[in-house]
Image (tube, grey):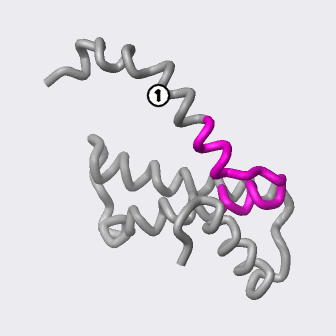
């Protein structure tokens, strides 16, 4: 099993090579990502939002749908040459610097 994002990208790449024949092209994967995010949105809207949940949706696994989003995201990163671990680390550093005081001082976030 993978320990970090970089290792997870490698696991996905090996899966594609061993089972998936090849990556779908980037546009197909972008459409697939949109579809998977829509499935997550449907679960969230119905399970945690104000919409009623249909019987057929009650068995949907949110974790599995989030994993689908992650898988396609990792595919896109692999096929476009993005080191997602480096990009994530850079983004977290940026957010920590930009948002620390902003969130600490946000009255809407206080209990």
Residue 46 drawn in magenta: no
Quadrant of image for the C terminus: top left
Depth check, front residue: 28 or 84: 84
Is 97 situated left or right of 54 in this image?
right
Where residue 71 appears, as percent x and y from the top left, is 62, 64
Depth check, front residue: 10 or 111: 10
Dominant SS type (magenta): helix
Residue at image coords 32%, 61%: 54
Where residue 22 appears, as percent x and y from the top left, is 84, 76
Q: Is residue 84 above or below residue 5?
A: above
Residue at image coords 23%, 12%: 107
Where residue 12 appears, as percent x and y from the top left, is 68, 72
Is 78 situated left or right of 43 in this image?
right
Where residue 50 appears, as percent x and y from the top left, is 27, 41
For residue 26, what is the image quadrant? bottom right
Q: Is residue 5 above or below residue 48?
A: below
Q: Which residues are magenta?
A: 72-90
């Amino acid at each position: 099993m993978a320990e970090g994002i970089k290792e997870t990208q490698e696991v996905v790449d090996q899966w594609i090579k061993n089972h998936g024949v090849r990556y779908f092209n980037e546009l197909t994967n972008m459409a697939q990502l949109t579809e998977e995010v829509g499935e997550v949105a449907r679960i969230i809207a119905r399970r945690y939002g104000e919409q009623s949940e249909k019987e057929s949706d009650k068995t949907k696994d949110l974790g599995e749908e989030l994993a689908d989003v992650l898988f396609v995201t990792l595919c896109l990163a692999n096929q476009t040459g993005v080191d997602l671990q480096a990009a994530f680390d850079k983004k977290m550093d940026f957010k920590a610097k930009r948002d620390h005081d902003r969130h600490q001082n946000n009255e809407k976030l206080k209990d």
